[in-house]
Image: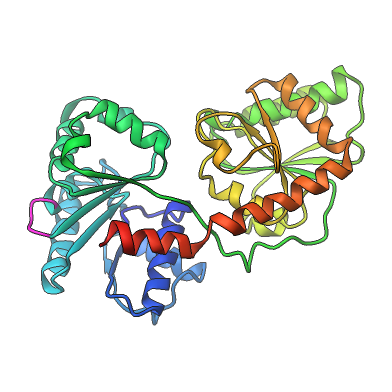
Amino acid sequence: MIGNSKLGGLERRYSKAFAKLQEKNHNSFLVVNQDLYNGLLQHSIISSSTPNIFIVKQKTSFKSFKTPLKFQLFAAFEILKIVLKHRINNLHLVQTQILISSILTLFPVKNKIITFAHTDFDPGYERGLKRLLLKFVLARVNRIDFLSNDIKNKYLKKYPLLSDQTENLVTPCSYIDYEKFIPGEKHKTIISLSRLDPIKNTKLLVEAIHIIINERKLSLDGYKCLILGDGPCKEELEELIKRYSIGKYVELGYAFNPVDYLKHSTIFVSIQQTNNYPSQSLIEAMACENAVIASDVGETRLLVDEQNGVLVELNSEIIADAILSLIQNPVLLDLLRLNSRSKVLCTHTIENFLGYLVNSLYR
């Protein structure tokens, strides 16, 4: 069961895995709400003929705690009817609102599994009803699926009993459609593709370009920087670009189809605050043969190392140095680009992910 209404990386990953399991005649079911179902159809992740999909017909997400109580209860009992009717043995809750999870974990199912995908521990669960409900759910699940070891360690530190009463597993990889994300003719483009939130540190990239152009009086050698995304920092970034007079070198926009940009770009910048692993956009960029500049935080080195990119501190001067080190050394740049695609093709595959689901999570 996927509780979110929006189609992000996690929703894509589990929905594609479900579709692949259906091709293999695996006895599995997918429960989503109407908005997510429409998004999956629109992006051809599933088709209208894909079997074993159940739609909880409500317009609001059943991920959000703010969803009205009557909708949460309705969703929980609709899902429960599916579980009982089909005698489901593995109930897997992905991005599912905590009250709905609490209700569903009350009922006898062989394996109750919950996925935690937040790269940081959600402060909303620190107190009050949400904290009590989370503890209630954690006491009743058999297995927990963590997006990374970093997230797992944070939860085990917060809830020490988990180490004794549940099986705590870590998703081994992410994956994308490698037939879609392939390199094209390369242009001199530096690209950042993410939601424009403070934790993404896109401001540091703008400042790095300013340092190169205005403070060091150096050339970008024909390169242009594309910052693609939307979010609360957009206005601040627009003001910075205007203040530094670097509109000729930095362009803000939005990518409805990221591959159209990534297949032509050369350098991908991912400078998140706490972790760049396993960023879907980063994997897509690597598949399209982009060298990477990434913040050396969290488990980023599981995707980016010195063989396919440059790891940096969260400092605009150091990011400027990294950009110059690549654009001034085209031989190194080409080597890193080629290594990027090889790395994700080797480890971040749907076959590895399905093996984890079938042999570990759902066994």
Q: Position of residue 231 (x, y in %)?
A: 55, 38
Give the vertical position of 14 relative to 326 (above or below).
below
Image side of residue 240 versus residue 218, left or right: left
Q: Which residues are magenta?
A: 105-109
* x, y percent for residue 141: 17, 47
Residue 33 in view in this figure: no
Q: Nearer the viewer, residue 173 or 118?
A: 173
Work out whether residue 344 or residue 36 is closer to the camera in this orientation and state it. 344
In the rendered image, the vertical position of residue 8 relative to residue 320, given as above or below: below
Assess whether residue 106 is covered by the magenta stretch.
yes
Q: Residue at x 76, y 29 (%)?
A: 322
Q: Residue at x 38, y 58 (%)?
A: 356
Inspect this view and state whether residue 245 appears: yes
Residue 197 on the magenta segment: no
Q: Is residue 215 left or right of residue 145?
A: right
User: Horizontal and vertical percent for residue 200?
Assistant: 57, 33
Please state, as top left, top right, bottom left or bottom right, where the N terminus lies in the image. bottom left
Instruction: State the residue at coordinates (51%, 34%).
Output: 275
Q: How many marks?
A: 0
Residue lying furthest bottom? 49
Q: Residue at x 18, y 49 (%)?
A: 142
- Residue 224, relative to residue 317: is it above or below? below
Image quarter for residue 253? Answer: top right
Q: Is residue 4 left or right of residue 212?
A: left
Look at the magenta stretch and give its main secondary structure: loop
Question: Residue 312 location in percent, x, y?
Answer: 67, 27
